[in-house]
Image (cartoon, grey):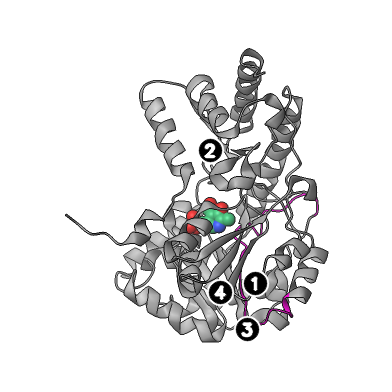
Amino acid sequence: MLHITDAFSRIGEENAFSVLARATELQRQGKDIINLGIGQPDFRTPENIVEAAIKALRDGHHGYTPATGILPLREAVAADLHKRFGVDVSPDLVMIVPGGKVTMFMAILMFGEPGAEILYPDPGFPIYRSMIEFTGAKAVPVPIREENGFAFSADETLALITPKTRLLIINSPANPTGGVTPKAEIDKLVKGLERFPDVAIMSDEIYAQMTYDGEQHQTLLAYPEIRHRLILLDGWSKTYAMTGWRMGYSVWPKPLYDAARKLAVNSFSCVNASAQYGGLEALTGPQDAVHAMVQEFDRRRKVVVEGLNKLPNVSAATPKGAFYAFPNISKTGWRAKPLASALLEEAGVATIGGPDFGVHGEGFIRLSYANSTENILRALERIEKFLNEHAQK
Ligand code: PLP
């Protein structure tokens, strides 16, 4: 009898990957599936980035790098943050990690243990809760509300902090809702956090460059008063269509940096050397591909929102960021997960049920518009037909 630790009875996962597996299986059986499930850009990584990584391999970058990442890349991250937000970040506090997820993994491991509480957005990226529960800490959901434009509420967040709260996770622009929290609300949160000096903050800003309608991303790095307890999560996956490269970075407060470095040394050692050179080119090379991609997402966003709002008993808020729509389907009479499952099996459209992002996701499904306009229109037609034929009382 093997004795795996109890923690594994509490670990969760990301249902988007199960939906992807099922969609791929249905495709293998010859079914025509439109995948609006998975959250990854449908674009190729820009060619200059691919070439830089190939060149790195040809130039002999085959060995380990420092656990925290190569210095030119950490410098480029600091320069990029300065260029985008006017903030000063020391390259010594930047750490290159294999994907955005790794920063949350490390941060939650640092603060989670039985007796501790960690606040996380719900609906939100499912790994927050999974990892919090893995550590034995209490996962405390911060409800993200449709009536609030899927922004988080500073007051509601602050009211959930107790003496046991160790870490607060926030995410804007947000997955799965596309919500962007306005600057005024973030100002209010930061001000309120003065009352809780022992709470660390992890700000997941992986969709920072994907905002629309003139919405400006407000980075938490811009608040000097919390920098000593702020962990920034960002990476290349979404911005540069590099999900498979596994390239992310974090900015740590000085006292936590060494703990993060030790976690790296104890697990992945360093990020793939050639990928780091690709990441360097991504930050220092031309940014046209990023702008073109965001413009294309913006066009599709309008198509998807307009189409969703024409569906019977469906209403969709206009997402201000990321590449997801999160329509309210509660008036269809369907619960979200059975609907997502039926849409995949019977209508050939992969989506994700809102409850896969937390209890407050009931009544919603997530559609990723990282797919062609043509496919989005076909998917909307199929969903309409399905809803008309399967009206629930
Ligand atoms: N944070 C959020 C909010 C995400 O949506 C994702 C990916 O979907 C990640 C982090 C993880 O990104 P990566 O694929 O780089 O690990």
Front label number (1 vs 4): 1
Name the residue nearer the viewer: 258 or 41: 258
At x 47%, y 56%, the residue is: 130
The response on whether ligand 1 sits within 8 Å of label 2 is no
Q: Is residue 101 located in the magenta-colored stretch of the structure?
A: no
Name the residue type under label 4.
Ala
Q: Main secondary structure of the magenta part?
A: loop
Front label number (2 vs 3): 3
Question: Residues in magenta?
Answer: 193-214
Cα–Cα span, label 1 and label 4? 38 Å
Residue 24 at x, y percent in the picture: 40, 32
Q: Residues within 10 Å of mark 1 (few under 14, many from 20)?
A: few
Front label number (2 vs 1): 1
Q: SS class of the residue under badge 3?
A: helix
Q: Which of the two discs, 2 and 4, labels the residue nearer the N terminus?
A: 2
Name the residue type under label 1.
Thr
Q: Which of the two discs, 1 and 4, labels the residue nearer the N terminus?
A: 4
Q: SS class of the residue under badge 1?
A: loop
174 sits left or right of 62 in the view: right
Residue 163 at x, y percent in the picture: 63, 76
